[in-house]
Image (cartoon, coloured by chain):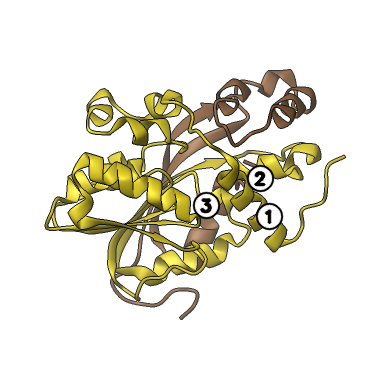
Amino acid sequence: MARDLMFQDEIKDAVRGAYAGIVTGAGERVARRFYSEDELAELPAGALAWALGVGDPVRYALLQPGESVLDVGSGGGIDSILAARRVGASGRVVGLDVLQQMSERARTHASEAGVDPWTEFRQGEMEDIPLEDGSIDVVISNGVLNLSARKSRALAEIFRVLKPGGRVSMADLTVEGELPPEIANDQSAWAG
Amino acid sequence: MAGALAERVFAEKLQGAGFTDVWIGGHRPSSIDETADYPLFTDEVIELMRRTIPPERHDHVTTGVIVKARKPEHGSGALG
């Protein structure tokens, strides 16, 4: 029987547990669905295999050399690496993920891609971003906001860390109408 | 996906946080078969989707979108 997941902490634990429990990514199927051949060629195999997003937010972000970028929910690091290539060594990329093991994975992939000198990965929550006010030019995220039970709080945090005139480019899922209650209340459906 | 918003609500939340120039595009339908590629979904929930979602919607359960917005040069957001 589906359980009623009305409580924010329960949803957060379900999402965190689901991501912590996976031992492999989607095996490049997801990456090949959303990224161009040129972009795929820029990425190490591990980053491709751990792509779990729903689009290509970097393509739309129009990043410029020297810009600072925050990747909210950086996962295996695919979008952070692409962003790091766009902003170059004069820029800065911070990947934020709630799971330490994902940050470690992303760090390895960024090193393999050669962008690690200007790319860092931190553990933290999108509803409490560990960055100073007005410190970021561009926030990207990929399939992450839908995972939050406190979306308004997460968006307020993104707003806070952006510089005046800063911008966001997010890929996410939307729904029209309602999902069946059996789906809406299922932990696994919240996590993906 | 259970936490996905309707586009209109997504835009309203961005505006509520203080963002301007909200743009939503790049629409891409996502099917149950594509959803099954993500290791985050159990076989049970994929089967539950096939049973509870009308067959005519199996090829378009959710929509992937790109959402862009800007923080104004002046002014404050929802947290002040």
Q: Residue at x 67, y 23 (%)?
A: B57
Residue at numbered disc 1: A11
The amino acid sitting under disc 3 is Leu
Residue at numbered disc 2: A190
From this viewpoint, which residue is outermost toward the right?
A: A1
Q: CA distance from mark 3 to mark 1?
A: 13 Å
- Asked whether A69 or B53 is in front, the reply is A69
Residue B38, by quadrant, is top right
Discs 3, 1 touching: Cβ within 8 Å: no
Mark 3: few, some, or many residues within 10 Å (few <14, many ≥20)? many
Indicate the chain on which mark 1 is placed.
A
Residue at numbered disc 3: A145
Q: Secondary structure at mark 2?
A: helix
Q: Earlier in the sequence, mark 2 or mark 1?
A: 1
Which chain did the image draw in brown?
B
The amino acid sitting under disc 2 is Trp
Q: Secondary structure at mark 3?
A: helix
Mark 2: few, some, or many residues within 10 Å (few <14, many ≥20)? many
